[in-house]
């Protein structure tokens, strides 16, 4: 279902009934997590319901955990997006309910694995505790056996060194029952719970009395009235003892896995609580029954039960372990010291298939915890790293635009002054009013926050078009080609907002029996209605924001001119406008906004009609200022001509313009070309260029002869280069042969022998007939690739589908020679481009930011079915990544923030040092060793005897998956297409009564007719409807990477800055110069808000700059901030400490010398000093003398036998700025990788 359908079908009833039920009994408590849903309910609630919610929050009955806009995925999300979604939710809570609503605990129970980056950010958000549910079965099994389900997590050593215990967090791992109430065995249900008239088909299942997610709450109530009994019978006098016994016995059994006598019992699971009154009514009776019988000698002696929130649970554990430490020490011989987990993450997530071919051990196998059984197989959740790649690419581009837009709005509004009160209506208010700013960004901010959800950009959503009120207009996006253009990753090729939205309006859903035009999936461009709804939300949010951003840019440009800044902006963010201006008036402007804190040096790509041009900096005094630019032909990433019609169908997407496809465009039928302009834009500044069109002229480019003069450039090689790198390709194989770092004096030191090619794995999908005690059945014989899981048929990939004998090569360089590229065609639908910038023979670009990388693009798709497409780099001749007998080592990132060391292996080492094998064969080993790449991955020489060790780094502009199967290799999976479901939830069977999309009959008897739903000759073994294949997507994507390689020191000198440049592209505006010639002549060529020549140090990244506005429009909202403020985040990206002088950097020129700084928690809702400062709990730990946990010392010996540390985070870090420090005197010392957040007030 779409998010609106989820709200209408589930969430609205949940919150409406919960609030009402809480008011009936003060003992009851309820926890909400995702503010996108709770805010939607609150905004639509009646004034009486809102006031009731305010009361319940104030008295602690209604609390919030995590509190982000969504519960974010921890594998594929970029860290600025995590911060954004958490800040959006936290600020809404603070603005709506006040300080009492600030979340203090994490509740990441459904994301598929846990990252160290999210744990670190949770600590910096002020959480006292953090809960994780989905953990590797082998880790969780060990933790349960050794009472190590709770520990203090120090996610990163550098952050711990910088922040101390403020960067550590107490972590609770949910046991094998995950976040659900333990299920009641079927026979016990039949014997004790089900109505006599419903013995054969009693859904039951656990502590749920409100129905299930197949129908809304009202339907279950109606069924109960019609049938005379409830399919989910409530607790009553006849079964309360059964429920109570089950709950107490289960609790006593599970308590053996924890050190504390306190147990967290999750009351509910996915898609429950449609009728909170029914849920509370039944649980009230169980609570009362147990509490009345827990005295000495009674049935439940020693058991205390109560409704509780995470605060209640963690407080109980904290009090038991800390405040009563002396008593515990006297009773047990030692106070409670918690173990420490340093660094590391819990990715990828692994579960077990416990069915097995014979199903003989099902009762003893847990899919979530414990050892692997001989007949089970692991299910590795690394497939979603590359599921729905089109959606992942769209999410990254839109989040970049949101971040840059917020920085521009903050810069322009702060200079002009933010108005708190505008006109009587929003339309009458100036763009820089707080109301308009909040309104402008709210749509895209909400959509980006939603897309961080663990079932959104992960690609693990269902296909949609089922169950829900769809009578209103539902516009959808058709998938096509996603990603950067073939010219640049800066998303310059944009259609107009209106055209873009028109392109995604493909139909309407008129009723529940709608024809659902988005199915069957697998048609060109069809990724399903839910995916399409996400795409639409992103595009609609950007459409609403773009005009305000354009107005802000225009006002910033003309603030010191005679132009009337009260009139509409003469800037557009539509490249078609530039084309029209050039063809009609012969002139146009391109304005570039730099969202970074450094001067942006870059070759920016702009789509223009083919022709002869001159380019100059705008402004009356800049006619003579030379501007470097170059022209290149479009179509670099086209499919082969024989398959052009196929790719055309897969490229139906806004933003994939005629230039990319190399086609004609416009009434004049003038083909498009790509212009590269060399820009040098000040931090947070603007730079404007005037383009003059001198008539049509085809782009002149030549196939430059192979350069000579170097020994390695033999006649069989094709080589080209710029100031920094030289790329050598074999003209025999048509593939990359080596990359040389030309900044090294020695050719040997700079040369890295590295090959690259494209390959494909075949998805595992084997199935077989087998017999069981229940009769004939059909099932898979191993884990299968799907939306969640990854499992290939082999441990090494094969050739791509329809591969050419050798890639066809085309080396393209323009007359100017500043841009050079090698175009490779591996198959009709797989194309690559290797591009270098600033490679002019006599005037090379020596700026490392602009030209110090290899720009690598890969366009692939549509894929054949059950294929997993990879790009493989092999630098084994130059880089050894194997130490001793271990597998290949490499590094990949957690959310783009923290790097993790990986080793390719079938084994995993547990915290006590024992090694366990978790991959039964090499195909499972492959899946186990694929990790997420969000921004970066690398391989590096491991031998300490190599004189000049080398490093190979890939910087990524999109999420994906990465591994290193052999020494010196780096393999990235960029796209997948599966033709079966992996039975992990994405394939949702619709409750369709029309028969149009009827589900497969669930009849296991031999000879069952599955006519009409046949798959491979019989009923589909994945039990999904024949049309619903979540990963059967025929799309074409363009992925973009920057390659850095050479000596380790040279690579590390540039990779951190380049990663930020790649993932923070500039915004482009196109001017209507012909319609505003008088004011246009006065536009300055450059606007530098920090002052001429000023910038932040190279070591410090300006992560965020935005206006802090009240996020709640609710009538009962708490008072917003009393005066306008900015949110400023800075991050040390260097491998050493760094200092930021506010005045020296020029920030005071923007913010004002007398502006004040207040340091805040990362999501802004806590001050770190002064009144009401954040204070976190104390935890005692036993330090580890090596890399293992000494369980004997931890659980038995007195704590004095080990180093005992008290975790007291109440004191602010020593580098925290005091309150009300002015800009003119502010100087900030940041430790390695430190990340700091501030409120700035005028």
Image (spheres, rainbow, N blue to C red):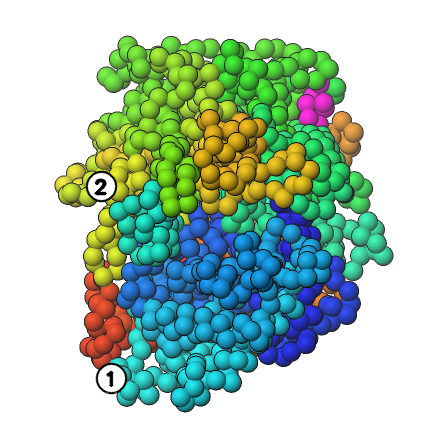
- Seen in the picture, residue 97 relative to 549 is either above or below; the reply is below
- Seen in the picture, residue 717 relative to 1144 is either above or below; the reply is above
Q: Nearer the viewer, residue 1175 or 967?
A: 967
List x then y, in percent, for residue 131. Answer: 44, 63
Q: Residues within 10 Å of mark 2 (few under 14, many from 20)?
A: some
List x then y, in percent, for residue 1233. Answer: 39, 55
- Magenta residues span 576-583
List x then y, in percent, for residue 810. Answer: 43, 13
The residue that disc 2 covers is 887
Whether residue 577 is in magenta: the answer is yes
The structure residue drawn at horizontal position 72% and vertical position 24%, both measured from the top left corner, is 581
Q: Nearer the viewer, residue 223 or 808?
A: 223
The residue that disc 1 covers is 333
The structure residue drawn at horizontal position 26% and vertical position 27%, both measured from the top left corner, is 753
Q: Residue furthest right?
A: 424
Q: Residue furthest front?
A: 196
């Amino acid at each position: 279902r779409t998010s609106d359908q989820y709200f209408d079908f589930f969430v609205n009833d949940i919150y409406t009934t919960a609030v009402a039920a809480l008011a009936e009994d003060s003992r009851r408590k309820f926890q909400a997590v995702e503010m996108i849903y709770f805010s939607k309910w609150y905004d639509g609630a009646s004034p009486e319901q809102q006031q009731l919610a305010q009361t319940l929050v104030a008295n602690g009955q209604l609390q919030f955990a995590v509190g982000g806009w969504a519960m974010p995925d921890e594998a594929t999300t970029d860290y600025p997006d995590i911060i954004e979604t958490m800040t959006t939710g936290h600020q809404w809570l603070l603005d709506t309910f006040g300080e009492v609503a600030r979340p203090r605990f994490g509740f990441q129970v459904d994301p598929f694995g846990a990252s160290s980056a999210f744990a670190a950010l949770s600590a910096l958000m002020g959480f006292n505790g953090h809960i994780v549910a989905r953990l590797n079965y082998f880790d969780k099994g060990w933790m349960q056996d050794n009472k190590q389900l709770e520990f203090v997590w120090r996610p990163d050593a550098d952050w711990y060194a910088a922040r101390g215990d403020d960067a550590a967090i107490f972590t609770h791992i949910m046991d094998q029952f995950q976040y659900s109430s333990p299920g009641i065995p079927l026979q016990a249900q039949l014997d004790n719970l089900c109505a006599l008239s419903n013995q054969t088909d009693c859904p039951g299942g656990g502590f749920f009395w409100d129905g299930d997610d197949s129908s809304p709450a009202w339907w279950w109530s109606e069924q109960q009235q019609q049938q005379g009994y409830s399919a989910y019978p409530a607790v009553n006098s006849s079964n309360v003892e059964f429920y109570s016994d089950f709950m107490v016995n289960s609790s006593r059994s599970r308590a053996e896995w924890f050190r504390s006598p306190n147990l967290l019992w999750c009351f509910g699971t996915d898609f429950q609580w449609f009728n909170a009154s029914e849920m509370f009514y039944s649980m009230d009776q169980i609570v009362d029954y147990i509490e009345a019988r827990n005295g000495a000698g009674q049935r439940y002696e020693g058991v205390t039960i109560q409704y509780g929130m995470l605060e209640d649970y963690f407080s109980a554990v904290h009090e038991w372990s800390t405040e009563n430490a002396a008593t515990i020490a006297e009773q047990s011989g030692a106070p409670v010291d918690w173990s420490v987990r340093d660094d590391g993450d819990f990715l990828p997530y692994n579960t077990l298939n416990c069915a097995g071919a014979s199903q003989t051990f099902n009762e003893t196998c847990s899919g979530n915890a414990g050892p692997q059984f001989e007949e089970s197989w692991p299910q590795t959740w690394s497939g979603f790293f590359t599921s729905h790649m089109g959606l992942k690419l769209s999410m990254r581009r839109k989040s970049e635009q949101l971040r840059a837009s917020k920085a521009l709005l903050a810069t322009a509004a702060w200079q002009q002054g933010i108005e708190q009160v505008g006109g009587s209506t929003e339309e009458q208010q100036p763009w820089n009013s707080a109301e308009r700013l909040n309104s402008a960004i709210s749509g895209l901010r909400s959509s980006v926050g939603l897309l961080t959800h663990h079932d959104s950009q992960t690609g693990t959503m269902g296909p949609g078009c089922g169950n829900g009120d769809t009578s209103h207009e539902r516009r959808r996006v058709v998938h096509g080609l996603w990603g950067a253009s073939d010219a640049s990753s800066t998303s310059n090729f944009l259609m107009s907002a209106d055209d873009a939205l028109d392109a995604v309006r493909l139909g309407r859903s008129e009723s529940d029996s709608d024809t659902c035009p988005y199915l069957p999936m697998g048609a060109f461009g069809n990724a399903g209605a839910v995916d399409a709804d996400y795409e639409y939300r992103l595009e609609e949010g950007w459409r609403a924001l773009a005009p305000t951003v354009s107005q802000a840019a225009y006002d910033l440009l003309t603030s010191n001119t005679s132009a009337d800044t009260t009139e509409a902006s003469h800037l557009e963010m539509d490249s078609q406008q530039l084309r029209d201006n050039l063809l009609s008036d012969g002139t146009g402007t391109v304005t570039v906004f730099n969202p970074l804190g450094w001067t942006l040096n870059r070759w920016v790509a702009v789509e223009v009609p083919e022709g002869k041009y001159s380019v100059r900096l705008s402004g009356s005094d800049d006619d003579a200022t030379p501007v470097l630019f170059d022209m290149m032909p479009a179509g670099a990433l086209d499919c082969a001509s024989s398959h052009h019609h196929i790719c055309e169908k897969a490229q139906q997407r806004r933003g994939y313009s005629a230039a990319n496809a190399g086609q004609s465009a416009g009434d004049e039928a003038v083909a498009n070309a790509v212009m590269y302009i060399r820009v040098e834009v000040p931090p947070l500044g603007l730079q404007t260029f005037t383009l003059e069109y001198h008539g049509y002229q085809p782009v002149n480019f030549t196939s430059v002869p192979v350069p000579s003069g170097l020994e390695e450039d033999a006649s069989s090689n094709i080589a080209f280069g710029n100031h920094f790198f030289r790329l050598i390709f074999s003209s025999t194989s048509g593939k990359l042969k080596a990359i040389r770092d030309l900044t090294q004096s020695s050719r040997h030191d700079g040369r890295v022998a590295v090959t690259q090619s494209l390959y494909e794995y075949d998805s595992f999908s084997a199935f077989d007939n087998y017999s069981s005690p229940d009769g004939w059945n059909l099932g898979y014989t191993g884990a299968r690739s799907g939306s969640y899981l990854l499992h290939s048929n082999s441990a090494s990939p094969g050739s791509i589908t329809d591969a050419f004998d050798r890639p066809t090569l085309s080396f393209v360089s323009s007359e100017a020679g500043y841009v050079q590229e090698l175009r490779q065609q591996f198959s009709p639908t797989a194309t690559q481009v290797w591009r270098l910038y600033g490679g002019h023979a006599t005037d090379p670009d020596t700026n490392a930011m602009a030209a110090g990388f290899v720009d690598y693009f890969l366009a692939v798709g549509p894929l054949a079915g059950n294929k997993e497409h990879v790009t493989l780099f092999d630098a084994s001749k130059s880089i050894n990544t194997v130490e001793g007998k271990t597998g290949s080592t490499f590094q990949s990132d957690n959310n783009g923030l923290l790097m993790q060391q990986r080793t390719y292996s079938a084994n995993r080492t547990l915290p006590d040092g024992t090694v366990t094998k978790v991959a039964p064969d090499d195909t499972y080993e492959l899946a186990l060793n694929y990790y997420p790449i969000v921004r970066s991955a690398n391989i590096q020489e491991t031998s300490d005897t190599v004189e000049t060790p080398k490093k190979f780094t890939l910087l990524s502009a999109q999420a994906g998956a990465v591994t290193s199967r052999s020494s010196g290799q780096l393999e990235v999976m960029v796209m997948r297409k599966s033709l079966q479901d992996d039975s992990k939830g994405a394939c949702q069977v619709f409750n369709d009564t029309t028969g149009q999309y009827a589900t497969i009959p669930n009849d296991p008897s031999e000879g069952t007719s599955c006519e009409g739903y046949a798959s491979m000759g019989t009923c589909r073994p994945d039990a999904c409807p024949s049309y619903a294949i979540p990963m059967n997507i025929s799309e074409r994507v363009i992925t973009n990477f920057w390659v850095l390689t050479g000596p380790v020191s040279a690579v590390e000198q540039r990779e951190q800055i380049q990663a930020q440049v790649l993932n923070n592209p500039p915004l482009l505006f196109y001017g209507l110069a012909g319609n505003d010639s008088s004011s246009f002549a006065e536009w300055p060529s450059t606007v530098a808000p920090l002052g001429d020549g000023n910038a932040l140090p190279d070591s410090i990244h300006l992560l965020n700059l935005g206006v802090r506005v009240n996020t709640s429009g609710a009538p009962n909202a708490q008072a917003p901030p009393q005066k306008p403020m900015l949110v400023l985040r800075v991050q040390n990206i260097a491998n050493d400490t760094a200092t930021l002088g506010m005045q020296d950097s020029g920030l005071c020129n923007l913010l004002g010398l007398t502006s004040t700084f207040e340091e805040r928690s990362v999501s802004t809702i806590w001050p770190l000093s002064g009144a009401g400062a954040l204070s976190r709990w104390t935890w005692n730990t036993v330090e580890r003398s090596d890399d293992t946990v000494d369980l004997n010392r931890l659980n038995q010996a007195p704590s004095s036998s080990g180093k005992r540390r008290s975790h007291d985070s109440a004191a602010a870090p020593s580098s925290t700025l005091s309150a009300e420090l002015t800009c003119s005197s502010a100087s900030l010392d940041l430790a390695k990788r430190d990340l700091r957040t501030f409120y700035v007030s005028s």
